[in-house]
Image (tube, rainbow, N blue to C red):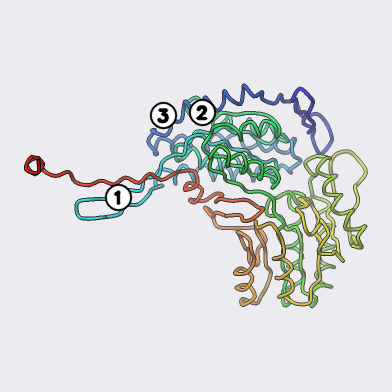
């Protein structure tokens, strides 16, 4: 992706470097118009019966399902995500829209009985207009979660997809918007400057999935306007490999976590701490896994991101780390980067301190599980962590002590349908997905209702 002075986005296929298309970024006037249209539609959509809103989301989910191949192909062309993975993201989006179509009508508050003649009601209401800023690494699934939750409880939405996949993001939103009244879902194209325009607008919710730096700017904008801010931002997720586990299985889990989607998943494994007792076998198996992944890994999203990924690797190598496989930019077109396994990494290296977001597995060999837990916890992010262990006491200690929103034991990816997550520290704030996201997208009005005195009693008291 490149950007000219005229705000024109040029999207190149990261597999080949060929032109996908050009998109003109929205002007400030277009951003204002989108917010105004969403504001004008907010009262009517908020007053629409919840079951009718759910019906609209059900219809939208069906239309997205029908367009799954088209959306997956667009995702592949714009981001390099392999078609099967991209289609899986679309199918996840369909499931999420259906989930919120069902959860929206049963989302409710609570009541309190103050006295026999009085009741307090805590009633959820839509916040109003939500600006939804979504990423490129799983563009349809992430957008479906935030947009679906916002719409289900009566908010209107202004959606700006990532500038790295504007065709995918716009096409998805257009499919959903066809099943909604005018203004309920507005779509705006553009880069970070457009996102900043929307974040500064008079809206009620700012929901962003993306980098920590951008998330902090959005949080600052929300503090100025009073908007509710929901952020899922960068992560530096550790994987702890304990003694006593099967080294081959652990290596397969590590490779999946580090190399799936070329390491471009919010909860990818970013750093690995392995017990010395299994380190030799684990590293041998991880190198074998990495070489198998070479045959099926897709490219990074663009060459700009590849420069970032390789910068972390090159810095580690210059500082004394060794690459057991990978570690160099390959010849040829596209934005490919090989699965890379690094050892002898120092804790102060960027590859361990910051989010690489690429197919890189930096490994630290530690003397015991306590050391792994201590080093894994020494980090400013707080998205997720994974632990591979046969020792349930270690598992219990780990999920209690790791300062992250999600801890996965013996499974680097996974979670129950309808599950949620709450990132911490530099990784963001607020719940994402699940019923809890409906709570984030609503505000509560407390209504106190008492019985009026009878007419005769009123007259007698005068």
Q: Is residue 176 above or below residue 421?
A: above
> Disc 2 to disc 1, how far (Cα)?
32 Å
Of all residues, the one furthest to the front in this rendering is 462
Quarter the N terminus occupies: top right
Q: Kindly identify which residue carries mark 2.
A: 38
Mark in front: 2 vs 1: 1
Towards the viewer: 193 or 208: 193
> Disc 3 to disc 2, how far (Cα)?
10 Å
- Residue in the picture at 37% in, 36% down: 49
Q: Kindly identify which residue carries mark 1.
A: 120
> Disc 1 to disc 3, how far (Cα)?
26 Å
> Where in the figure is residue 295, as x and y percent of width and height?
83, 51
Q: Quadrant of residue 14?
A: top right
**Left or right, 314 with reference to 109:** right
**Left or right, 333 with reference to 160:** right
Quarter the C terminus occupies: top left
Evaluate if marks 2 and 1 touch, with contact meaning CB atoms under 8 Å apart.
Answer: no
Mark found first going from the N terminus, 1 or 3 = 3
Q: Kindly identify which residue carries mark 3.
A: 44
- Residue in the picture at 64% in, 70% down: 398
């Amino acid at each position: 992706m490149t950007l000219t002075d005229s705000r024109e986005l040029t999207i190149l296929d990261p597999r080949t470097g060929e032109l996908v298309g050009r998109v003109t970024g929205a002007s400030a006037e277009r951003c204002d118009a989108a917010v105004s249209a969403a504001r004008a539609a907010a009262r009517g959509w908020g007053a629409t019966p919840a079951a009718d809103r759910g019906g609209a989301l059900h219809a939208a989910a069906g239309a997205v399902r029908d367009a799954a191949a088209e959306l997956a192909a667009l995702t592949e062309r714009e981001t390099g995500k392999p078609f099967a993975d991209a289609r899986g993201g679309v199918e996840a989006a369909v499931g999420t829209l259906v989930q919120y179509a069902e959860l929206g009508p049963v989302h409710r508050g609570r009541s309190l009985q103050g006295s026999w003649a009085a009741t307090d009601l805590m009633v959820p209401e839509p916040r109003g207009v939500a600006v939804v800023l979504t990423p490129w690494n799983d563009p349809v699934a992430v957008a479906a979660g935030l947009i679906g939750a916002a719409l289900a409880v009566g908010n209107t939405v202004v959606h700006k997809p990532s500038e790295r996949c504007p065709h995918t993001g716009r096409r998805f939103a257009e499919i959903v918007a066809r099943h909604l009244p005018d203004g309920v879902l507005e779509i705006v194209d553009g880069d970070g400057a457009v996102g900043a325009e929307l974040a500064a607008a008079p809206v009620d919710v700012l929901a962003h999935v993306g980098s920590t730096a951008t998330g902090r700017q959005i949080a600052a904008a929300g503090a100025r306007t009073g908007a509710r801010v929901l952020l899922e931002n960068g992560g530096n997720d550790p994987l702890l490999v304990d003694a006593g586990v099967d080294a081959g299985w652990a290596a397969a889990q590590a490779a999946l976590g580090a190399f799936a989607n070329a390491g471009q998943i919010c909860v990818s494994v970013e750093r690995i701490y392995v017990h010395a007792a299994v380190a030799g076998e684990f590293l041998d198996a991880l190198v074998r896994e990495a070489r198998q992944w070479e045959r099926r890994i897709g490219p990074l999203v663009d060459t700009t991101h590849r420069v970032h990924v390789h910068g972390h690797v090159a810095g580690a190598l210059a500082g004394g780390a060794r690459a057991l496989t990978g570690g160099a930019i390959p010849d040829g077109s596209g934005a490919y980067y090989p699965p890379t396994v690094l050892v002898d990494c120092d804790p102060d290296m960027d590859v361990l301190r910051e989010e690489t977001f690429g197919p890189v597995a930096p490994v630290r060999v530690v003397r015991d599980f306590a050391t792994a837990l201590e080093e894994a916890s020494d980090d400013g992010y707080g998205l997720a962590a994974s632990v591979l262990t046969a020792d349930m006491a270690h598992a219990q200690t780990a999920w209690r002590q790791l300062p992250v929103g999600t801890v996965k034991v013996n499974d680097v990816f996974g979670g129950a349908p309808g599950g949620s997550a709450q990132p911490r520290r530099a990784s963001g704030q607020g719940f994402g997905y699940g019923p809890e996201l409906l709570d984030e997208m609503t505000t509560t009005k407390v209504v106190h209702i008492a019985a009026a005195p009878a007419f005769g009693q009123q007259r007698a008291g005068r």
